[in-house]
Image (tube, rainbow, N blue to C red):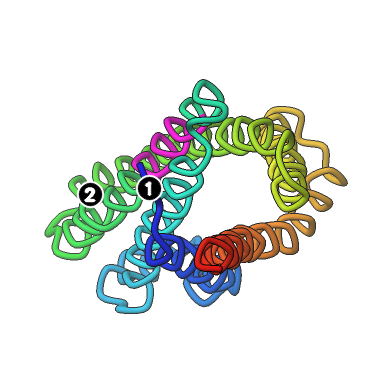
Amino acid sequence: MNITKKDLWFFAICSFLTVITTLGIHSGIFDFETTNIIEQVGLYKNSIYNLGFWWIIAHCLLVLCSMWGVFLIQYKKTLTLIGLGFLSYAVFCFTEIFRQLLYLFYLNGQFKRYAFADNDELRDSIFQEIQSFSLISYSLFGLFIFAFALGNLCYGLSLVRGSKWDKLLGYILLIWGIQGLLTLGNEFWEINWMGILIGKFSLVCQPFARLLIGLWFLNLVYELQKLKLKNNV
């Protein structure tokens, strides 16, 4: 399969857009943390709250597109690693999309049911379902972290054997993958300082890594153009 310059530009743009979506996710714009059930129930009518779920869905699809681009470039070199990596990214993507759709349709539906419930017994029953949902979401979040970390590790191992740009991106992905596994582990260890360190590291590492993936694609555009000029001489 021949990758064209247009393909590379598409993958690069997807990568650069993930920088924006990542910053948006971590900006706090879409965070509506509240323990007040009345305020919580009213969130289903909040357009910014609902936009946050679609924002994350778009982010996941953009990530998958950019990682598909890496797969297309690398699969002839390290098929097993890059194939397992892309499969992991696909699991991450669709797990998180499924989780966001559960918020949009299931949880919002429960909020609406609670708001229009006409007796305390029904409201108590719905409240218990809302509380239980957080455990389901938390479990899916664990799968999301594990799949993404595995994808990063596989892609990182695939790339560290290549050119200088490949090595740079490969090492960044390996670091990111290890950080993902530590994040998952700390959900059980509950080490406070580690949680703070991982959180701060993620704020820097995630947008930087996504920017680097975009630049990696642009470097391939440059290499392709240079090869084309050389062949025309």
For label 1, the residue is 2
Q: Nearer the viewer, residue 105 or 81?
A: 81
Is residue 189 found left or right of 97 in the rendered image? Answer: right
For label 2, the residue is 106
Q: For label 1, count other residues whose C-alpha is less than 10 Å away and answer few (under 14), some (14-19) or many (20+).
A: few
Q: Name the quadrant of the N terminus.
A: top left
Image position, residue 174 (x, y; %):
73, 38
Q: Which of marks 1 and 2 is in front?
A: 1
Please provide the residue range marked out in magenta.
85-96
Is residue 215 found left or right of 160 in the rendered image? Answer: left
Quadrant housing residue 8: bottom left
Q: Main secondary structure of the magenta part?
A: helix
Residue 112 covered by magenta stretch? no
Q: Nearer the viewer, residue 199 or 173?
A: 173
Circle 1 SS class = loop
Circle 2 SS class = helix
Q: Furthest-top residue in view?
A: 80
Quadrant housing residue 207: bottom right
Image position, residue 44 (x, y; %):
27, 68
